[in-house]
Amino acid sequence: MANFIRMKFLSTIIVLLLYSWNAASQSFELNGTDTINKIDISKKRQGYWMIKAKPPKFSEYPVGNLVEEGSYVNSRKEGLWKKYFPSTKLKS
């Protein structure tokens, strides 16, 4: 009986660990009610992205300013992308 309880406990722990690993392997952000900056289980960028300035990569931009926005499909930029000057005016 003790072995049965121990096995049941271990199998429950394994299932919970697998579930938490799967949930942690996807990430996203919310912009109001929209989901943005999604990374799927294969670690590929998907959907609409808003790239904001973070040092040191975008040192000429104030932190948090929008640098560019557009859509990704399987980590490749697709369609129209908008780029912005550090002053937040549309570049292209």
Image (cartoon, rainbow, N blue to C red):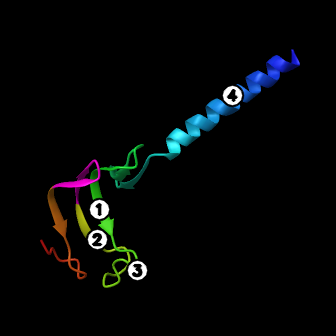
Amino acid residing under circle 4: Thr
Q: Is residue 51 left or right of residue 88?
A: right
Name which quarter of the figure residue 66 lies in: bottom left
Name which quarter of the figure residue 88 lies in: bottom left
Whether pointer 3 and pointer 1 mark residues with C-beta atoms closer than 8 Å, the reply is no
Magenta stretch holds residue 85: no
Give coordinates of residue 86: x percent, y percent.
Answer: 25, 81
Callout 3: few (<14), some (14-19), or many (20+) C-alpha neighbours within 10 Å? few
Q: Which residue matches tag 4?
A: 12
Amino acid residing under circle 2: Leu
Rendered residue at 51%/41% (across/down): 23
Q: Which residue matches tag 1?
A: 50
Q: Which residue matches tag 2?
A: 66
SS of the residue at dot 2?
strand
Name which quarter of the figure residue 53 lies in: bottom left
Q: How far apart are labels 2 and 4 at the CA level?
A: 44 Å
Give coordinates of residue 35: x percent, y percent.
Answer: 34, 49
Magenta residues, as a range? 70-78
Whether pointer 2 and pointer 3 mark residues with C-beta atoms closer than 8 Å, the reply is no
Q: Which residue matches tag 3?
A: 56
Whether pointer 2 and pointer 1 mark residues with C-beta atoms closer than 8 Å, the reply is yes
Question: Closer to the camera: disc 1 or disc 4?
Answer: 4
Q: How far apart are labels 3 and 1 at the CA level?
A: 18 Å
Q: How far apart are labels 3 and 4 at the CA level?
A: 44 Å
In the rendering, which numbered label is found on residue 62?
Answer: none
SS of the residue at dot 4?
helix
Rendered residue at 38%/45% (across/down): 40
Give coordinates of residue 9: x percent, y percent.
Answer: 75, 27
SS of the residue at dot 3?
loop
Q: Earlier in the sequence, mark 2 or mark 4?
A: 4
